[in-house]
Amino acid sequence: MRKPFVAGNWKMNKTVKESLALVRDLLPGMEAVTGVEKVLCPPFPSLFAVSTLISGLDIGLGAQNMHWEASGAYTGEVSANMIKELCQYVIIGHSERRQYFAETDQTVNRKVKAALSAELIPIVCVGETLEQKQAGQTAGVVIRQVRDGLQGLTSVEASRIVIAYEPVWAIGTGLASGGQDANDVVKDMIRPTLASLFGENIAQAVRVLYGGSVTGKNAAEFFNQSDIDGALVGGASLKVDDFLQIIKAALK
Ligand code: PEP
């Protein structure tokens, strides 16, 4: 049984004060839902304040990025150990990081390993661009991102990760994938790749989320699929009613 999982990626939104206000509004509704792993991923400056607000509650905290080195002369970067004092999760390889900050499967792989060494749970993002989809390259891209991003992990390490399938053309566009189409990618590309790397048991145990324009209205379409275990939510995670509706829908 894979426990349903919903994470909100706030991206570069919300000051510390605004973050606290949003969490206060979300708390009653989030606490009311049990049986779903619920995770908030605010920007770095808000992590400490949010961690104090949700301390002791059944709500996880995640960072949106990290560096693979443990410490040193990397101005502007944040290490896994720094995040670990506040968070249990970290998003790695989001398409916006790949697109605007030149992240590659190789840097994703280094970050995933560093996160796991610090006992953080990496939420590893994969997904094809519109051009790649139109060129019939979805399978090649997604399989390569999973294989190279997770290269060198042990089976035990692999069993701890969460994967988010996020077609780039669906992120922030309002053009969500069809539930069946997203499920096909997870079932026919992502899980078989995990199986070839780590064995069938791990492939069936790893949670795989869908991300890309998920809303309260369309969430159930994804959660009703056989191989989709939850959602990584961007825009709608900043809207209290929408995000709570998504969390409730994850209890399929
Ligand atoms: C995301 O940022 O991971 C995302 C899926 O964004 P949105 O839900 O806004 O498409």
Image (spheres, rainbow, N blue to C red):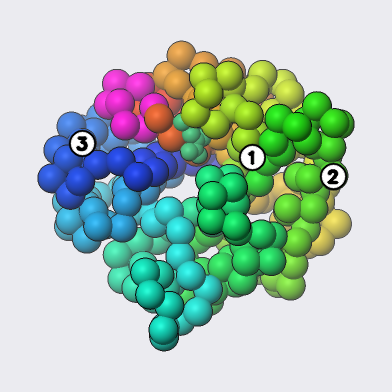
Is 136 positioned to the left or the right of 176 in the image? right
User: Amino acid under label 1?
Assistant: Tyr
Q: Which residue is mark 1?
A: 165
Figure disc tally = 3
- Magenta residue check for 34: no
Dot placed on the residue nearer the N-terminal end, 1 or 2: 2
Instruction: Give the camera-side residue of 33 and 147.
Output: 147
Judged from this view, the residue extending furthest toward the bottom is 72
Is 137 positioned to the left or the right of 1 in the image? right
Dot placed on the residue nearer the N-terminal end, 3 or 1: 3
User: Amino acid under label 2?
Assistant: Gly
User: Amino acid under label 3?
Assistant: Leu
Instruction: Find residue 171 and report its horizontal and vertical position in percent.
Output: 54, 31
Q: Which residue is mark 2?
A: 140
Instruction: Find residue 234 and report its horizontal and vertical position in percent.
Output: 43, 35
Determine the CA span between mark 3 and mark 2: 39 Å
In the image, what residue occupies the spot 23% across and 53% down?
46
Proximity of marks 3 and 1: CB atoms separated by less than 8 Å? no
Q: Which residue is mark 3?
A: 22
- Magenta residue check for 238: yes
User: The magenta stretch spans which residues?
Assistant: 236-242
- The answer to which quarter of the image holds residue 55 is bottom left
Foreground: disc 3 or disc 2: 2
